[in-house]
């Protein structure tokens, strides 16, 4: 009987020992799962924070992109405005230059006498001969050439010309000059005295195109006298442009 009781006790102990081991195993398993769950929660929180940080950075980048786009539009508008200002400046500069040129062109006037120095006659010649008035008193605009005697219109407009010729009397030889526009004979000044001193004069206003030429021509078989008193002269000036 004692042996039986001992066996039952031993069996009970074994059974009790087996149940405790199973509980310990279950607790250990739950602990591992909980630890994994905690790790997953920590990782999830970390990822959420990273996502939030990235979202914040993305928002900042989008904001910066919006600011960059705004700056680009502003720069484009400024570039357009600058181009417009440059264009207006170029136009204004061209107008100013044109006005300056126009003002300069409007300042056209000259006066010259026949001989550069001394005294004496020019002519008579058998053929018509162009006169060169060499003693220049005024040549504003340099439209008159004292080497050729030719005035060249710098701009289209109305010009006024005057000319005077003089000579001492002669039984046969008169004094005269013809004003010529390009190849067209316009007005003549003519004087013939057998005795004494005589002068002749004439004047005309002409519409000239830019590049037209005007000069005086000594009529054939006539003569002109000049000295330091400058009695034979050729003058002209621009009245107004057209």
Image (tube, rainbow, N blue to C red):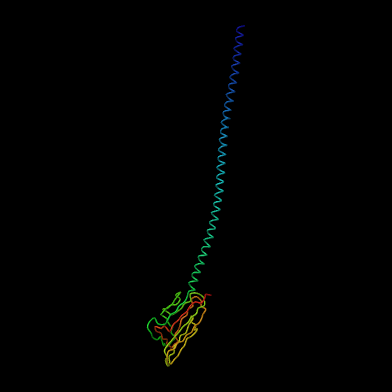
Q: Out of 189 and 80, give the one closest to the viewer.
A: 189
Position of 28 with respect to 136 (left or right) is right
Q: Quadrant of the image for the N terminus? A: top right
Q: Specify the quadrant of the image occupied by residue 112.
A: bottom left
Please state the total of marks drawn on the protein image: 0
Q: Where in the figure is residue 104, as x and y percent of width and height? A: 48, 72
Residue 237 in picture, x, y percent from top left: 48, 78
x%, y% of residue 174? 44, 89
Between 7 and 78, the one lying in front of the other is 78
Q: Quadrant of residue 218?
A: bottom left
- Residue sitting farthest toward the left: 118
Q: Is residue 101 above or below residue 219?
A: above
Horizontal relation, residue 177 to residue 50: left or right: left
| Viewer-proximal residue among 195 and 124 | 195
Q: Is residue 138 above or below residue 63?
A: below
Q: Is residue 30 above or below residue 208?
A: above
């Amino acid at each position: 009987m004692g042996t039986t009781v001992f066996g039952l006790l031993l069996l009970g102990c074994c059974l009790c020992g087996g149940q405790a081991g199973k509980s310990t195993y279950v607790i250990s398993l739950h602990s591992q799962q909980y630890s994994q769950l905690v790790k997953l929660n920590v990782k999830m929180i970390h990822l959420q924070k990273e996502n939030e940080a990235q979202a914040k950075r993305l928002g900042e980048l989008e904001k910066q992109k919006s600011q960059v786009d705004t700056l680009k539009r502003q720069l484009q508008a400024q570039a357009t405005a600058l181009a417009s200002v440059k264009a207006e400046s170029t136009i204004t500069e061209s107008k100013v230059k044109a006005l300056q040129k126009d003002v300069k062109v409007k300042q056209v006037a000259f006066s010259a006498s026949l001989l550069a120095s001394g005294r004496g006659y020019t002519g008579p010649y058998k053929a018509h001969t162009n006169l060169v008035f060499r003693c220049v008193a005024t040549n504003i605009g340099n439209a008159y050439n004292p080497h050729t005697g030719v005035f060249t219109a710098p701009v289209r407009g109305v010009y006024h010309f005057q000319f005077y010729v003089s000579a001492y009397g002669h039984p046969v030889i008169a004094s005269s000059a013809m004003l010529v526009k390009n190849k067209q004979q316009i007005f003549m000044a003519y004087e013939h005295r057998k005795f004494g001193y005589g002068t002749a004069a004439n004047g005309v206003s002409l519409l000239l195109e830019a590049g037209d030429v005007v000069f005086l021509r000594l009529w054939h078989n006539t003569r002109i006298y000049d000295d330091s008193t400058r009695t034979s002269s050729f003058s002209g000036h621009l009245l107004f442009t057209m």
